[in-house]
Structures are given as structure tokens and as C-alpha cells.
Amino acid sequence: MSLVLVDGHYYAYRSFYAIAHLTNSRGEPTNAAFGFAAALLRMAEDLQPVRGAVVFDGGVPRERLETHPEYKANRKETPEALEKQIPLLYEVAQALGWKTVSVEGEEADDVIASYCQAADGQNCIVATNDKDLMVLAARGVKIYQPNSAGFALLGPPEVAAKWGVPPDKVPELLALTGDASDNFPGIAGVGPKTAAKWITEFQTAEGVLAAAETIKPERFRPILRDSAEIVRRNRKMVELRTALPLPAPIAECQIAPDPQKQVELFRRLEFRRFTREAEARLASHKPKQADLFSPS
């Protein structure tokens, strides 16, 4: 049985920026809600999931802020037009049958990692493009990414081809390069290719630091010596927390679409195509008149 975990933060922003302008007749922004619905409908078609949850951020863990107070401080406030649609994203997900979860004070990445850990031998798929979550592919998890040809499920070979290191080494690579989107810089002048080369040779970020006096190109030797504290900080920042209490048990994440709710919601949002499709699903769910009087 597959358990599909959707990175709600990633898909909210992806949907919002993918469709620049979309409003209903009342002038309310609906672009993020439309894109979110389209993404979840496509996932259902692509993956045929049995269980699933859309995981939203609930804040930033105190431990990460203590390690690096400027963590994510560079991020702009959520655009007002997207902020207004966040409740709609929950409605969309729930109408399509997905459990919606978040944990106060915790990031979605860690909640997703905790679900994957708890699922153990189950077939887990994570829908995201977040580099921090690529490490999960080392534990049997597949990373779902739609593309022009359909979709891809990234496992260890695909992650290694993309990043230059196996999934379990991605955190080591990020310790060296940092992550500008999360506002923690890495070693000056070190990009993914150089970092991947070093990790391949020395296995870990700590191993790279230990080899600072022999590293090539030589110009990086003094920079590495001066960057040891930053690298060790980064390695702590990218470590996923995998033992969080689950906001909903896996058994309660059964996907159960509600066509009636879909029709009502999509009509209100004025998504005509989605409304027609939901009406068709509703009609197929309703018992035929003759069936109402047939013996059970």
C-alpha cells in the first residue's frame, strides 16, 4: 500500500506562481487553489495512492533557530493573495480525500521524514522538489516529480545523477554549499560540483574539513580552515528530525474523496472544468434508481 506525502508549502508556492492571475467573479484570487487542485488530481491519477497526507509547515523548530538565528530570515512574507488562499488549499485537499496535517513549531520536512520513518517497510512516495528531502530516497522512499513526459519517481540512482552524490550524502553536500533559500551560506566559492567531488573522495563534510591541508584546488585550503564552524553548523541545520509524534496515525490517512464536497467547492471557486469532472464522479457514485429498491 502506498503512502503519498505532499510537501504542502512547496506545492502552495509552486501553484501560486505557476498561474499569474486568476480570480473568480467576486474578484477573489484563486490561482493557488486552482494549481493545487490540478496538482493533487494529477497525483491521484499518476500514483493511485491508498493513503496520503498533505503536510504544511507549522513553524520553525527552536533548535534550528538556536543553531542559526538568521535561518529563513531572508524569506519575504507570504504574498497576501496566497495567504488568503491557504484555507482554500486545505479545503481542496480535504475534498479530494487527502488528510491535511501540520505540527505546531515544526517544519513540514521533519513531519514528512517522521511519517516515512514510522511507515518503515511501507511504500512511501514524497511529492516535493525540496533538496533537504532527497536524503529520504536512501531509505526506500521515492520522490515524485511531474514533468513534461508525465512524471518521475526518483530513487537513489536518479538522485545521484542529479546531485552527484547518493541520497544519504546530500546532507553532507549541503553542509558545504549551504542553502541560500533557507539563508544559511556555505563555503565561499564552493558549488555543488566541487562539493560533490569532495564528498565522493572524503565521504562526509567532516572528512573534507579533516583533509583541508591536502584539498584541491589549493586555493580552498585556507577557506576551508576558516569555514569549519559554518560547515558544522550547516550539517546540523540539514539533519531531518525523524521521531516527531505524528499529527494523525498512518491508518487514518486513508484517501477518501468526497465528490459532493468537490462539486460545491469547485462551483464556489468557479473552476468549471473541475466542477464538471466532480459532477461526473458524483453521478457515478450515486446508486441508480433501480438499485434503491433491490435487495442488498
Image (cartoon, rainbow, N blue to C red):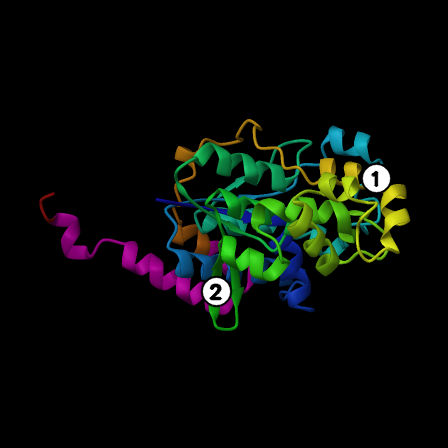
Q: Residue 109 placed where, x, y %? A: 62, 42
Q: In which quarter of the image is the C terminus?
A: top left
Q: Can residue 30 be seen in this view?
A: no
Q: Residue 166 placed where, x, y %? A: 57, 51
Residue found at the far bottom of this picture: 148
Residue found at the far front of this picture: 214
| Callouts 2 and 1 close, C-beta under 8 Å | no
* Magenta stretch: helix, strand or loop mostly: helix
* Res 280 → quadrant: bottom left
Residue under label 1, please give it: 228
Residue found at the far left of this picture: 295
* Res 129 → quadrant: bottom right
Q: Can residue 55 be seen in this view?
A: yes
Q: Residue 270 placed where, x, y %? A: 55, 64
Q: Viewer-proximal residue, 265 or 59?
A: 59
Say if the magenta span includes residue 245. Answer: no
Residue occupying the point 61% across, 37% down: 110
Position of 228 compared to 3: left or right?
A: right
Q: Viewer-proximal residue, 240 or 191?
A: 191
Tell me the amino acid under the disc marked 1.
Answer: Ala
Q: Which mark is drawn over residue 151?
A: 2
Q: Quadrant of the N terminus?
A: top left
Q: State which region is magenta.
A: 264-293
Say if the magenta span includes residue 273. Answer: yes
